[in-house]
Image (spheres, grey):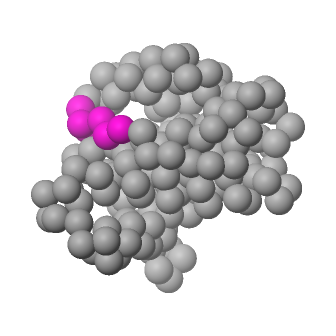
Amino acid sequence: MEPDPTASLESLVDTLAPNSRVLGLDLGSKRIGLALSDVSRTVATPMKTLKRAKFAQNAKELLDIAEEHEIGAFIIGLPINLDGSEGPAAQSARAFVRNLAAKTDIPIALWDERLSTAAVERTLLDADTSRKRRAEVIDKMAAAYILQGALDRLNTI
């Protein structure tokens, strides 16, 4: 079994450079939602959505974004089932992390994303957002939801 390439949130506290940002990812089967933290790492903002493509292309896009925004760490949502088990989506996320870790020294942490998309969808519905608009923004908003949870935890460590 290969070693786990993920960092713990606790270890990120000690390794993040001052004023570096954190990039949050919501890995979907068709799209990757991105969210960016501010330099104080207290607020997550929805950024953009990437179309899911071959891994090499998505990795290049992510690493280009990381360089442009001085990213100190990636937080990737881990889709754990409600009963705490990991299914195919979690295995896919772990595979993505392993492959990305092989291409960069930027630390990568996983964050439990249970119900993140459902919570964002509920918020968008409450705001009376159209179906078309929800489809356009849900992935990056889910990424922001995931990242905000991780940032809130980071700031208590």
Q: Does residue 95 appear in this view?
A: no
Quarter of the rendering containing residue 71: top right
Q: Which residues are magenta?
A: 48-53
Q: Is residue 120 left or right of residue 110?
A: left
Find residue 145 and report its horizontal and vertical position in percent.
Answer: 50, 59
Q: Is residue 52 magenta?
A: yes
Residue closest to the eye, 46 or 28: 46
On the question of residue 147 being in view, the answer is yes
Q: 137 or 143, which lies in front?
A: 137
Q: Is residue 65 left or right of residue 38?
A: left
In the rendered image, the residue lying farthest to the front is: 127
Q: Residue at x 69, y 33 (%)?
A: 39
In the depicted structure, whether residue 68 falls above or below residue 128 = above
From what the image shows, is residue 16 above or below residue 33? above
User: Is the magenta region chiefly helix, strand or loop?
Assistant: strand
Residue 109 location in percent, x, y?
63, 45
